[in-house]
Image (tube, grey):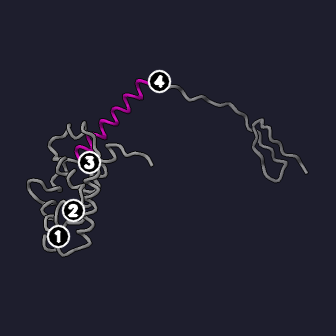
Amino acid sequence: MAKLTSLDHLENIMVSLNRIAFYVSGLKETQFEDDIKTKDAVYRCIEILGFSSSQLPKELTGKYPQISWAMINMLCVQNCFSDDDLWSILHDQDFGLLKYKAKIERILENEQEQLTVYKNSKNKLSMPEIPEPTLNVKINLTMNYKYPIKTSSSIWTVKKR
């Protein structure tokens, strides 16, 4: 199994945030508290989000101090908050996870652009453009057999029975 890159972890964080937003959209706090399936789905997304954020390198998290990475990493620890706190973890003005959605989306786009620029500059520097070779191979089509056979001076021959 291949090791995930920091870009993969950022995408996992973004997917988890999008899912959480979808799961709780249109719900009031009392409806959310009564819906066990939604709470379980949100818990799972928070676990994925916390794990993925804990796997991000310090260089990346240091570039974006506007995100409280330590708080998000803390969510990786299971049972670090109660069921009663779940709604406030999502919607709180100071540390609510859903407020980070737009910021992390911009970070993901920025990192994808930087990776694209890096790949393009690397390809231009190390790989000169080489024209594709053209092949002038003549293919003979033999029609005196039951099925036509395409050959190009092959070592395989078909004998007539």
Q: Amino acid at mark 3?
A: Ser
Q: Tag 2 or tag 4, which sits nearer the N-term?
A: 2
Residue located at (17% from left, 70% from top): 27
Does 137 sit left or right of 161 as displayed?
left
Answer with the quarter of the image where residue 43 lies: bottom left
| Residue depth check, mark 1 versus mark 3: number of the one nearer the observer | 3
Residue marked by disc 2: 79
Magenta segment's dominant SS is helix
Indicate yes or no whether the magenta region holds residue 40.
Answer: no
Q: Which residue is mark 3?
A: 54
Give the label, 3 or 2, closer to the camera: 2
Residue count near mark 3 (Cα–Cα under 10 Å), binned few <14, some 14–19, many ≥20: some
First reached walking from the N terminus: tag 4 or tag 3? 3
Of labels 2 and 1, earlier in sequence is 1
Q: What is the CA distance from the residue labelled 1 to the residue labelled 4?
A: 56 Å
Kindly indicate the quadrant of the structure image that contains residue 110.
top left
Identify the secondary structure beneath mark 3. helix
Q: Secondary structure at mark 1?
A: loop
Question: Which residue in the protein does label 4 denote?
Answer: 128
